[in-house]
Image (cartoon, rainbow, N blue to C red):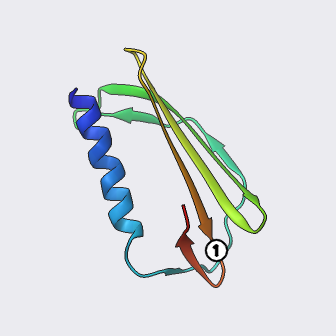
Amino acid sequence: MIAKRKLAALFSALALMSSGSAIEVTELAGAAHGYPGLCDINGKKLADGEFRQWVESNRLHIIITYKFSAGEVYEEHSQFRQQPELIQEK
């Protein structure tokens, strides 16, 4: 339950950061793939993650997935327009 609250707080913080004014893009983002770990404030690993991003139809698509040891899976899908400014569409 604590992990759910922390994850919800993380996603809320990300949403707040992206809800303000648009950000000027100086270099367009491209494809990326990584495996971040989600840790608590003490560094204890809570979940294994997978981060994927790619450009399709002039939109930056991002999927972040976290798998917890108890079997819970959380996934966030985002879509951004990069020009003329970085704007989250989904």
Q: Secondary structure at mark 1?
A: loop
Above or below residue 55? Residue 18 is: below
Find the residue positioned furthest to the right.
57
**Quarter of the view holding residue 12:** bottom left
Give the residue at x 41% y 82%. 21
Count of numbered circles on the image: 1
**Where is residue 18 shown, x and y percent of the image?**
42, 68
Left or right of 87, for residue 57: right
Residue at 34% of width from left, 26% of height from top? 46
62 vs 90: above or below: above
- Residue type at tag 1: Gln
**46 to the left or right of 65:** left
Quarter of the image where the C terminus is located: bottom right
Indicate the quadrant containing the N terminus: top left, top right, bottom left or bottom right: top left
Q: Position of residue 87 (x, y in %)?
A: 54, 74
**Is 32 left, or right, of 44 in this rendering?**
right
In the image, residue 69 sits, relative to residue 16, either above or below, namely above
Q: Residue 34 vs residue 68: left or right?
A: right
Q: Residue pushed farthest top?
A: 70
Label 1 CA crowd tier, 10 Å (few <14, some 14–19, many 20+): many
Identify the residue at image location x=63%, y=72%. Answer: 81
Residue drawn at x 33%, y 33% is 39
User: Residue 43 lies in what quarter of the image?
Assistant: top left
Q: Mark 1 sits on what residue?
A: 82
